[in-house]
Image (cartoon, rainbow, N blue to C red):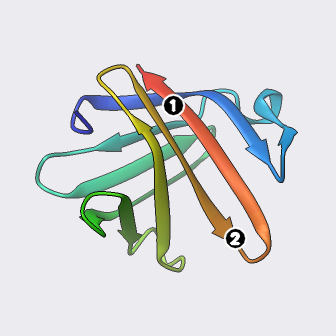
Amino acid sequence: MLFRSTWKIDNYHENGVDLTSLMGGYTETYTKSGNYSYSWGVLNGTGTWAFQNSDANIQLTGISNQKTYTLVILKLEQTEFWYYYMDGSNKKEFHMIQN
């Protein structure tokens, strides 16, 4: 279900604060072959992804020279993909929908 081409932002919270309005146009793409990319205005990057922890997490690596991120999957269905990750002490939660 993750390989459904591109996902777009539907809702974004940081530390429980709704910041969706700041994320307009943000998209992520996951391919079956393990490639990952994101796009947000003039910002974009690529890397790789892989399921971990019995498919409960996704590890993103090599994203445009950034650190590795572990996404904790909250919901993964045909038209919805919800996850969060910790950036230091900041919890960043994304609710993505099929684009």
Up-down: is 87 above or below 1? Answer: below
Up-down: is 2 above or below 65? Answer: above
Left or right of 75 in this view: 52:
left
Q: Tell me the amino acid under the disc marked 1.
A: Met
Q: Secondary structure at mark 1?
A: strand
For residue 87, the mark is 2
Q: Closer to the N terminus: mark 1 or mark 2?
A: 2
Left or right of 98 in this view: 21:
right
Image position, residue 39 (x, y; %) = 51, 42
| Label 1, label 2: how far apart the Cα atoms are | 18 Å
| Mark 1 burial class by Cα count in 10 Å: few <14, some 14-19, many 20+ | many
Up-down: is 68 above or below 8? Answer: below
Residue located at (47% from left, 77% from top):
68
Q: Residue furthest right?
A: 17
Residue located at (36% from left, 19% from top):
79
Q: Tell me the amino acid under the disc marked 2.
A: Asp
Q: Give the quarter of the figure containing the N terminus.
A: top left
Left or right of 90 in this view: 28:
left
Residue located at (38% from left, 51% from top):
37
Q: Give the quarter of the figure containing the C terminus.
A: top left
Q: Residue furthest left?
A: 33
Up-down: is 23 above or below 88? Answer: above
Image position, residue 31 (x, y; %) = 20, 45
Residue located at (61% from left, 41% from top):
94
Identify residue for label 1: 96
Left or right of 7 in this view: 94:
right
Q: Secondary structure at mark 2?
A: strand
Image position, residue 58 (x, y; %) = 36, 61
